Each structure stands twice: as structure tokens, then as C-alpha cells.
């Protein structure tokens, strides 16, 4: 995680977080430990709780505790132990929170209003958390500034586009061991994530078909050289289908009725509602069969359809999720967002705020530097020209 490492070196020298109490509720993984260490290098006193008991790495908790961090969590812990970890971090009186799902800020707002005045602000790592915090803001109850790290451009590019694009195909390959070259892959949804899937599938030699409901995105896909068509038409063509829309029932009974024998169905969207699983079960002549781990086969009489990972998010269920290089960008944004809150929290005011453009640019600059890539700089005359309005 070279970007985070370079930030840690600067923070250790400048100590902008000296004495700052930071509470974090994130997936407790090795990458998160690097984030905690960067914040601690800057002087922060960090308490960390698990944002999901199923993703906690016990050795990481142990290593952080040995480092002096108040880390809570155990893989597979029950709901009470999980909630106790969140409360333990809240008990430490955080001045800045880092959330992945808004747990800390939710508990603070719902159960500890007396602690809200201590808050300088928070950051949020995921869409679901932002939905909750924006709902709180809409009710006029959000008490501090929150920076939407999830929506930084560098986060979108690495997390959604490159990260999910690659890891979705990785999950499909791990589950099926298919040869992608020569196959027709249908990508349903050409947003941040779908673009990444389509790009990587084309790179693997597949014929890529895109299905969209947004004319701008459909046009973009067509101009990128992908075939664009309605899902019902694509249903007859595809060997592999990937839903990545954030919507429900994108593939349903009419599509199943047209699909080829052996077609593979995978979902990379957040919830397992993108493929209509009830309609798939109803179309089958009998109960489905587990033909491989994570591959469930439905016999439709004349054809068989293969569903991956029970329709759950395939890159996490069948693969390893995001590589460290992706989390490097997310957590670099987190560190710089905390620094921004400490420096400017009072001026920001309560509400959900975008990651400042300067933070995004700095993360991109550091990533380029870590790759050994140099770029040009505007001359003063060029900068003035771009700011001006006179002809010529
Ligand atoms: N698997 C992962 O690790 C991962 C990572 C990031 C995002 N996601 C999830 O992927 C989903 C998409 O995220 P995004 O950032 O690409 O969203 P996005 O809004 O940028 O793109 C979604 C696209 O789907 C299209 N769409 C909606 N309904 C459709 C339909 N019925 N048929 C065809 N297209 C349709 C929309 O027009 C849009 O262009 C979300 O559920 C998100 O949470 C998953």
C-alpha cells in the first residue's frame, strides 16, 4: 500500500493528529491495520471495532492490540459481541469517527447525544452508510460534518471500476474455471462497476454485450465498441451474464426462458435481488443441484442454467474481494479526509460533504509517484490562459 505508506511517513514527521481520539468501525483486515498505523503515526489514539464479524482477521486484531491500539472483534462473533465492540469504541469518546456502514455515528446520535458535542466530524466508506447519514441529515439531526469517502473519484475509479471489474471476473473464474476467450459475456448495467467488468471481459477475449436503461450510458458503451441490446435479446446470445445495476429482477423468467443450455448467471451488485431467484427456482423441473462449490444448476427440462454464489455478490462470495492496491486508495482518502476535518471541520458545518478536490488530486498524485509515473505541469502562462476569457 505505497500511497498510505508515503502518507504515514509524512504524518509521523508532522504529527497533525497529536492527542486526537479517533474511533473507527471498519472491516478488521490487514489493510485496515495499515490505516490505523498511519493515523497512529500522526499522533492519533485509535479505537477500532469490526464493521462485519465475518470479515474480521483475528491475527490482525491481536497485532493491533500488541501495538497499543484498542481493537475489538473476533471472526464469527455473535451480534451482542459485535455491538459491544462498537459501544467500546464509542465509550472512548471519539472526536473523529471512521465508519463503514455508519454504525458509530448511528450509536452516537441515537444513544449518546451528550457525546455529539465532542465530535469534530466523521468519514464514511460505503454507500449504505451514506444513505443512513443522508437520512439523518434530511431530518435535520446530523450533528457534525461527514466526508463521503465512498464518492471520491479515486475511490470510484479503483474500488468500483478497476477493483470490482477485475475481482468479479476472478470470482466467476474461481467458481467455474471457464475459458473467457470466445465466450459472449452480457454485462447488465454499465455504471462505474459495469464498465470495469465489461473492460476486463473484453481484455480476456470475450465478446461483450451491454444492456442498459440509461441512454447516455448505453451510448457510451456503444461508442466504446460494445454491442448494446435489450436484455431479452441478449438472453439468447450470452454464455455468461453479470448483473451489476443496483436494481432488482434484472434477469427474470422471460430471460431464463430464452437462455442457452449451460449459461452462467452471476451478480456483482450489492444485494442478491438482481437475478430473480424465485422465478429461477419456479422455472426448474426439480430442486437445483450443487454441481461445483458455489455453482448451483437449475434444470429447465431442455436446458440447464448455472447460478454462481446463490446470486450473492460474486467477487466477495467466490473471490477474495478487493486487492490491497484498491484499499490503498480508499484509505489514503480516509487519512486525508481526517486531516481535512481536523483542519477545517468547524467551517464545514454539519452535513454530508464531498471529498475535497484537492484530496482526490493528492491521492492520484501519490499513486502516480508510487508507480514512477511523471506528468507535466501547467506553465504560468498556460494556467492564466485557462483562467481567462479573452479570445486567442
Ligand atoms: N461487488 C462489489 O464489490 C461492488 C463494488 C462497487 C459497487 N457494487 C454494487 O454494484 C451496483 C452498481 O454500482 P455502480 O457504482 O456501478 O452504480 P451506477 O449507478 O454507476 O450504475 C448502475 C447502472 O445500472 C443501470 N441499470 C439500472 N437498472 C437497470 C436494468 N434494469 N437493466 C440494465 N441496466 C440497469 C443504470 O442505468 C446504471 O447505469 C450497486 O449495487 C453497488 O452497490 C458492488
Image (tube, rainbow, N blue to C red):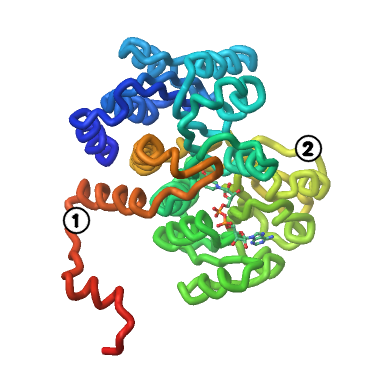
Residue 280 on image: x %, y %: 76, 48
Of 262 and 309, the residue lying toward us = 309
Left or right, 39 with reference to 111: left
Where does label 2 land, which residue?
287
Residue 286 on image: x %, y %: 81, 40
Q: In this view, does 283 lie above or below 42?
A: below
Q: Farthest residue toward the bottom?
A: 392
State the image quarter where residue 36 is shown: top left
Q: What element carries label 1?
A: loop
- Answer whether residue 260 is visible to the viewer in this image: yes
Quadrant location of the C terminus in the rendered image: bottom left
Left or right, 285 with reference to 383: right
State the image quarter where residue 380 is shown: bottom left
- Answer whether residue 295 is visible to the viewer in this image: no
Where does label 1 land, which residue?
373
Quadrant location of the N terminus in the rendered image: top left
Q: What element carries label 2?
A: loop
Amino acid at each position: 500500500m505505497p500511497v498510505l505508506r508515503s502518507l504515514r511517513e509524512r504524518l509521523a514527521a508532522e504529527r497533525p493528529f497529536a492527542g486526537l481520539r479517533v474511533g473507527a468501525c471498519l472491516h478488521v483486515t490487514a489493510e485496515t491495520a495499515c490505516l490505523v498505523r498511519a493515523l497512529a503515526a500522526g499522533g492519533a489514539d485509535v479505537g477500532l471495532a469490526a464493521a462485519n464479524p465475518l470479515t474480521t482477521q483475528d491475527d490482525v486484531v491481536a497485532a493491533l492490540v500488541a501495538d497499543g491500539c484498542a481493537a475489538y472483534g473476533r471472526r464469527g462473533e455473535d451480534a451482542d459481541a459485535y455491538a459491544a465492540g462498537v459501544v467500546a469504541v464509542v465509550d472512548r469518546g471519539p472526536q473523529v469517527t471512521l465508519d463503514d456502514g455508519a454504525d458509530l455515528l448511528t450509536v452516537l446520535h441515537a444513544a449518546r447525544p451528550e457525546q455529539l458535542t465532542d465530535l469534530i466530524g466523521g468519514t464514511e466508506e460505503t454507500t449504505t452508510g451514506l444513505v443512513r447519514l443522508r437520512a439523518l441529515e434530511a431530518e435535520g439531526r446530523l450533528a457534525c460534518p461527514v466526508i463521503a469517502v465512498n464518492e471520491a473519484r479515486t475511490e470510484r475509479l479503483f474500488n468500483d471500476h478497476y477493483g470490482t471489474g477485475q475481482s468479479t471476473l476472478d470470482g466467476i473464474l474461481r467458481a467455474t474455471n471457464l475459458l473467457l476467450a470466445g465466450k459472449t459475456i452480457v454485462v447488465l448495467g454499465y455504471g462505474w462497476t459495469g464498465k470495469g467488468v465489461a473492460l476486463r471481459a473484453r481484455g480476456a477475449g470475450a465478446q461483450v454485450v451491454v444492456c442498459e436503461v440509461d441512454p447516455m450510458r448505453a451510448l457510451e458503451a456503444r461508442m466504446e465498441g460494445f454491442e448494446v441490446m435489450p436484455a431479452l435479446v441478449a438472453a439468447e446470445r450470452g454464455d455468461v451474464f453479470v448483473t451489476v445495476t443496483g436494481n432488482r429482477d434484472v434477469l427474470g423468467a422471460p430471460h431464463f426462458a430464452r437462455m442457452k443450455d449451460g449459461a452462467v448467471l452471476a451478480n456483482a451488485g450489492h444485494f442478491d435481488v438482481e437475478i430473480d431467484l424465485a422465478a429461477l427456482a419456479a422455472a426448474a423441473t426439480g430442486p437445483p443441484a450443487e454441481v461445483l462449490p458455489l455453482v448451483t444448476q437449475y434444470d429447465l427440462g431442455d436446458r440447464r442454467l448455472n447460478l454462481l454464489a446463490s446470486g450473492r455478490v460474486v467477487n466477495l462470495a467466490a473471490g477474495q474481494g478487493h486487492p490491497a492496491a484498491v484499499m490503498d486508495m480508499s484509505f489514503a482518502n480516509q487519512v486525508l479526509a481526517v486531516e481535512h476535518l481536523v483542519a477545517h471541520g468547524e467551517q464545514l458545518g454539519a452535513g454530508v460533504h464531498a471529498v475535497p478536490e484537492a484530496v482526490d488530486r493528492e491521492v492520484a498524485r501519490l499513486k502516480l509517484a508510487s508507480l514512477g509515473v511523471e506528468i507535466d505541469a501547467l506553465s504560468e502562462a498556460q494556467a492564466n490562459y485557462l483562467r481567462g476569457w479573452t479570445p486567442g
